[in-house]
Amino acid sequence: MLTLRFSIQRYLPEQDRIPRMQLYELALAQMPRDWMLLDALEHLRQQDPTLAFRSSCKEGVCGSDGMNVNGKNRLSCITRLSTVWDEVKDKDGIIKIHPLPGLPIIRDLVVDMNQFFQHYAAVQPWLIPPAGDRDHELLQTPTQRAELEGLYECILCACCTTSCPAFWWNPDKFHGPAALLAAQRFVSDSRDQHTQTRLQALDDAYGTFRCRNIQNCTANCPKGLDPSGAIRALKRKMLTE
């Protein structure tokens, strides 16, 4: 019998003054080859119905189940249970799970995403076409369309932004990697007519240049995107245009 141990951060606002860690155990006949971490969490919630975490699509698309596992931000629905177990089995044998860092905790692993989405909305993540010219398609060449690869696939899980020290230091001012990735997506779009306006809005002490290029964001993106590279491209654009 294989017994997996989990140390999960708990915070029940009606009774806890500060967050605490709680140990859980899950007994399995053997390591299920097809289980994701979310499957284990759902079994633990059967043991303790008060355990709170978000999940929805279970396919790595909705981005709702971001959490910090063994010190790295991940989506529990596409993180293999065997992977996180292998990381700790030769150490203390405890899988450690915390909420995404840098955001207010609502309950257990559920964080308040309002500030994250406010920063995202602030970069105007939508296409702004030419004024008075909206009666027909805005076409792109295959080359122009290729410029958007790696920029539009973000699922807004916040794993990148909540791994960024610049965001931890200035969470109310610095937009963070996810928002800046979205900004670069529209700066790069040949159909958008507000490139200069977008760049000017981000060119301040807490804008794009607040990024220190630590690249935690890229290392923690569960979709394999490169927010750090997108921010570097934004910086080059600001310096050359």
Image (tube, grey):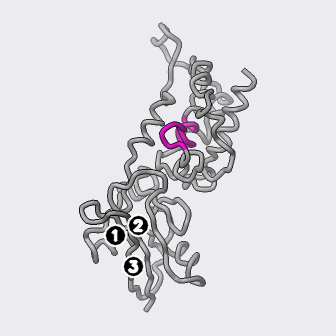
Q: How far apart are marks 3 and 2 (CA)?
A: 17 Å
Q: Please, what is the three-letter code of the amino acid marked with disc 3?
A: Leu
In the displayed structure, 107 sits above or below 28; it is above
Q: Earlier in the sequence, mark 1 or mark 3?
A: 3
Instruction: Please say whether residue 229 is one of the residues in the magenta stretch.
Output: no
Tell me, for residue 42, which label it has, or none.
1
Q: Is the C-beta separation of discs 1 and 3 under 8 Å?
A: no
Q: Residue at x 43, y 92 (%)?
A: 1
In the displayed structure, 117 sits above or below 83; it is above
- Give the percent coordinates (x, y) of residue 220: 58, 56
Q: Name the residue under label 3.
A: 23
Q: Is mark 1 on a helix, strand or loop?
A: helix
Q: Residues within 10 Å of mark 2 (few under 14, many from 20)?
A: many
Q: Earlier in the sequence, mark 3 or mark 2?
A: 3
Q: Name the residue under label 2.
A: 38
Tell me, for residue 132, which label it has, or none.
none
Q: Is mark 2 on a helix, strand or loop?
A: helix
- Give the percent coordinates (x, y) of residue 61: 45, 51
Left/right of residue 165 with respect to residue 238 in the rendered view: left
Q: How far apart are marks 1 and 3 (CA)?
A: 15 Å
Left/right of residue 123 with respect to residue 10 in the rendered view: right
Q: Is the C-beta separation of discs 2 and 1 under 8 Å?
A: yes
Q: Distance between the residues labelled 2 and 1?
A: 6 Å
Of tags 1 and 3, the one toward the viewer is: 3
In the displayed structure, 59 sits above or below 95; it is above
Highlighted magenta segment, given as a residue range: 170-182
Q: Please, what is the three-letter code of the amino acid marked with disc 1?
A: Glu
Q: Residue at x 53, y 42 (%)?
A: 170
